Image: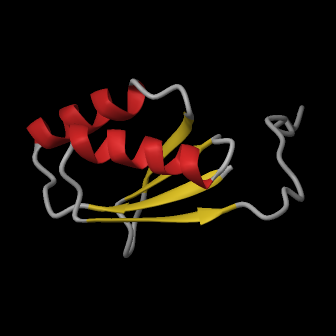
Amino acid sequence: SVFILVRTSNHDPDWLQKFRAAVSGFPEITGVYRMSGDLDYILRARVADVKAYDRLYQRLIAKVALSDVSASFVMEEIKETTIVPVELR
């Protein structure tokens, strides 16, 4: 997995629609999160290696203008779950 950290200087509705369409078109991208703070978006992607990430990166920046993109690769997945505890009252 790789987490793709995105900053943009454009926050208008047209750009957002284009960004949403772009990231929705990549099956490798498994999560997209709009953030508070210094980053605008974090994307989670499943890629085989750095070359596969670079291909994804090149395709992404060809579709939508981004101010800054960096990536952090997962070295070890310690925990991941989709189970959410539900309290019954």
Looking at this view, is 14 or 3 the one in front?
3
- Residue sitting at 59 percent across and 66 percent down? 72
- Residue sitting at 16 percent across and 53 percent down? 11
Image position of 75 (left or right of 2): right
Image position of 72 (left or right of 58): right
Q: Position of residue 60 (x, y in %)?
A: 33, 42
Image position of 39 (left or right of 64): right
Q: What is the total number of numbered labels drawn onto the structure image?
A: 0
- Rendered view: 65 above or below 39: above
- Residue sitting at 72 percent across and 60 percent down? 74
Looking at this view, is 89 or 27 the one in front?
27
Q: Position of residue 68 (x, y in %)?
A: 30, 67
Residue 86 location, quadrant: top right
- Rendered view: 62 above or below 41: above
Q: Position of residue 30 (x, y in %)?
A: 58, 35
- Residue sitting at 10 percent across and 47 percent down? 12
Q: Position of residue 83 (x, y in %)?
A: 84, 35
Residue 63 location, quadrant: top left
Image position of 66 (left or right of 55): left
Looking at this view, is 59 or 11 the one in front?
59
Tell me the colour scheme of the image: secondary structure
Residue 85 location, quadrant: top right
- Rendered view: 1 above or below 13: below
Looking at this view, is 63 or 54 the one in front?
54
Quarter of the image with the C terminus in it: top right
